Amino acid sequence: MKKKILSLILVSILSVSMIFTGCSKSTDNGNKNGETTSGTKPGKKTDIVIGTGGTAGTYYVVAAALASAINNHSETLNVIAQPSKGSVENINLTNTGDIQMGFSNADGVYFAATGTNMYEKSGVQNIAGVMSLYMSAGQIAAMKSSGIETYGDLKGKKVCLGPPSTTITEMSKTILMEYGIDPEKDITPYYLSFDEGLQKLTDGEIDATFFVAGVPTAAMISATSTGNVTLVDVDQKIIDKIASEKSYYIPYKIPAGTYKGTDKDINTFKIMTEIFVNKDVPEDVVYEFVKQALENVEEYRNSHIVCAEINPETAASTSAELHPGAAKYFKEIGIIK
């Protein structure tokens, strides 16, 4: 009798086990058509970590929205937007393979791809171009009462040259040096985030602050709301000279009235924001990234005003040679030969 009861118990346990095992297989392996219950093909997606910037900055906002769009449509990629200290850290981490992709201004990508400027000692970095995104403008703000109108007026002043660990400071230093101002000796340099620089300016702790951002940008609109903060101009001759020597800096005028207190056009430069990748990332991965990023741009276009500039024509022009996967997509749609 006891043996019979024991046998019945064992049969019951095995039956329940088979039911749960069957459910598990259905979830993992999908239905008879080879699809999972979510409608995607079976198999683990490839993680792509992309370095951005601070969570309050444009890099992170755009990257997070772009990643979401790709993840919604790609059956093979899972893109992760990772906050970072900015361009230089992104390049360094991508070069070593700690992350797969990163955001940077075009000058940083150029320096890394050619082994120049900050990469002269370490040499050419293991990166390739993926796509260009949007343009940002160099802007330097000062209190209207300071009398600072051009970069030439900054000698002897306390000046924020841009955030640390970014290539933004390269633009401000380049302009100052063309005015004959040594950015380490002839001014008191500060390296602060966008928001910190504007705060210290309006608090009277520094005389001017430099940043690179879309035009207009919300933080600057807020800082100029009283009309007490204005933008500093660059002489046209200096604009022309720098542009002729450094192709990644593009002459640009910020129209008068863009910000309250700025009553004339301001000469400056625009620079492209780009995505780059470790050269060792497989071709099919980069192809899929670019394809989904461009073909689903409408899904994230409203995440930030700069996303309105993203299009296949400008995307194909990068400061580093295109990765074969990116080149394959741009050839496929007829943008490059």
Image: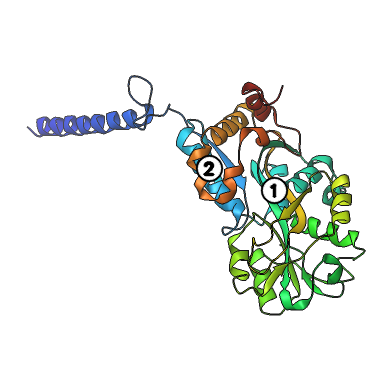
Mark 1 = which residue? 104
Left or right: 310 in relation to 337: left
Mark 2 = which residue? 67
Give the residue furthest to the top: 33
- The quarter in which the N terminus is drawn is top left
| Residue 164 in view (yes/no) | no
At horizontal 62% and vertical 57% (from top left) the residue drawn is: 216
At horizontal 63% and vertical 70% (from top left) the residue drawn is: 224
Q: Position of residue 126 (x, y in %)?
A: 75, 38
Give the residue furthest to the left: 1
Colour logic = rainbow
Q: Are marks 2 and 1 in contact (CB under 8 Å)?
A: no
**Alpha carbons under labels 2 and 1: distance apart:** 16 Å
Q: Which of 31 and 242 is in front in this view?
A: 242
Q: Where is residue 23 in the image (x, y as percent from the top left)?
A: 28, 31
Name the N-terminal-most of marks 2 and 1: 2
Numbered disc 2: secondary structure: helix
Callout 1 crowding tier (Cα within 10 Å): few <14, some 14–19, many ≥20: many
Give the residue furthest to the right: 180
Q: Position of residue 17 (x, y in %)?
A: 25, 33
At horizontal 79% and vertical 45% (from top left) the residue drawn is: 248
Amino acid bearing label 1: Ser
Numbered disc 1: secondary structure: strand
